Image (cartoon, rainbow, N blue to C red):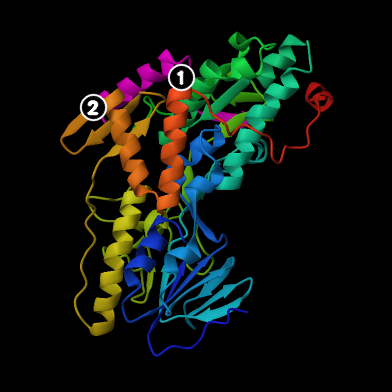
Amino acid sequence: MMNIPDSKHPRVVIIGAGFAGLSLARNLKYKNFQVVLLDKHNYHNFQPLMYQVATGGLEEGSIAYPIRKILQNHKESFFRMSEVLSVDTTNKKVHTDIGTIYYDYLVVATGSTNNFFGNENIEKHSFVMKTIPEALQIRNVIIQNLELALQTNNQKIRKKLMTFVIVGGGPTGVELAGALAEMKKAFLPKDYPDLDFSMMDIHLIQGGKRILDAMSDKSTKAALEFLQRLGVTVHLGQIVSDYDGNVVTTKDGMQIETKGMIWSAGVKGNVVKGVDDKTNRSSRIITNEFNQVEGFTDVFAIGDIAAIQTEKTPNGHPMMAQPAIQQGKLLAKNIEALEKGFPLEAFVYNDKGSMATIGRNKAVVDLPNLHFSGIFAWFVWMFIHLISLIGFKNKALVFWSWVYNYFVFDRESRVLIHPLKRKLSEEIDS
């Protein structure tokens, strides 16, 4: 059961505790509303640093923060760990696996999920990185592949286990490829002195003509140069059509044998049943400039799941943290205005820039009127991500880990906590 008490204040139910949902909940905290936040996890994870968990640079606890701690000290804010099954917009109810709750205002902030474009083989055999458990699984696969490689003298099997393919040249793919290349360069040879790391190949496959295609030409060229300098093989203009757990195949016929393919080539809206008929082709919920779902005044969508379709943004805003945070902040004002009968304020995205890191002393930064790369960009990237983390302890843990990793050039978090049930005999047979 939900066990949410009745209140004299209007109830705002928020589905999802990502950047958008938390931004809204925090900005509604001291207004005259009862806020009920629903999420299937009891923590918020800082997704921009997920790749560092996957590559052993950070412990998972340093990028996770308890949702209840964010909402504490406010008697009208409630959190329930639950999975939302559907919403009933006619009767203003949300159905979850722990019960049903009514709302006065509903906000869908469910974020995005992986888009495999209908390819069941890729969905079945590849690894993804949208959640902390998935990031840990990638870390386990990397380490376990190397452990298995030690157990065979068959060079073909060993090569397949030591080859990693990352599909998708956006920030996630680029940052993951750079971090994996640094693992190969810095400390994996020390851990596995009896492996020949010249056999370890890292491939980054991008369907478009450039990586980081949302950034400036200057930044994409610099990022490509950084990756190639680290030894990453970048394939541009190649679309992956299949992966059977052994061979990555592209539409042009290129094939790469690997036991570790990581998929970051596409995302789509993580839509909720009941409003799934209000979506565009990317499964994002279509809203007006006030984040109101088409056809409603009391149902909203914000963050990655929302597509504010205007002449300037026909496909919606970028699926990144900043638009989500800004939409959550403005929606808190608009819900209050709606309750008081005041006019609403249209959302205008304040693009503060974008950035990506490609390893030690290597990053690219695009600001509205400035583009730069290299070590200064790397320090800017670290500073922005550090101050964006929630909680002093998390900031301190990440800062200490970065300082330690920088001077020692090592990463401590490379232990197998929950290894996959794999045996070398099974890899050979496959």
Q: Quadrant of residue 1?
A: bottom right
Residue 289 percent coordinates (x, y): 26, 63
Of residues 98 and 263, the one drawn nearer to the viewer in this rendering: 98
Q: Amino acid at mark 2?
A: Phe
Residue 48 percent coordinates (x, y): 43, 42
Side of 17 relative to 82 (left or right): left
Residue 353 percent coordinates (x, y): 25, 40
Highlighted range, magenta? 216-242
Q: Secondary structure at mark 2?
A: strand
Of residues 199 and 239, the one drawn nearer to the viewer in this rendering: 199
**Within 10 Å of the Cα at label 2, are there few (<14), some (14-19), or many (20+) other Cα atoms?**
some
Q: Is residue 99 above or below residue 123?
A: below
Q: Secondary structure at mark 1?
A: strand
Q: Amino acid at mark 1?
A: Val
Residue lying at the far bottom in this picture: please name it. 8
Q: Quadrant of the C terminus?
A: top right
Q: Residue at x 15, y 35 (%)?
A: 369
Q: Residue at x 38, y 30 (%)?
A: 357
Side of 338 relative to 18 (left or right): left
**Residue picked out by circle 1:** 234
Circle nearer the N terminus (2, 1): 1
- Residue 19 colored in magenta in the image: no
Q: Can residue 211 be seen here?
A: yes
Q: Residue at x 35, y 36 (%)?
A: 382
C-alpha distance separating marks 2 and 1: 22 Å
Q: Residue at x 51, y 33 (%)?
A: 57
Q: Is residue 111 above or below residue 352?
A: below
Q: Quadrant of residue 339?
A: bottom left
Label placed on residue 372: 2
**Within 10 Å of the Cα at label 1, are there few (<14), some (14-19), or many (20+) other Cα atoms?**
many
Residue lying at the far left in this picture: please name it. 369
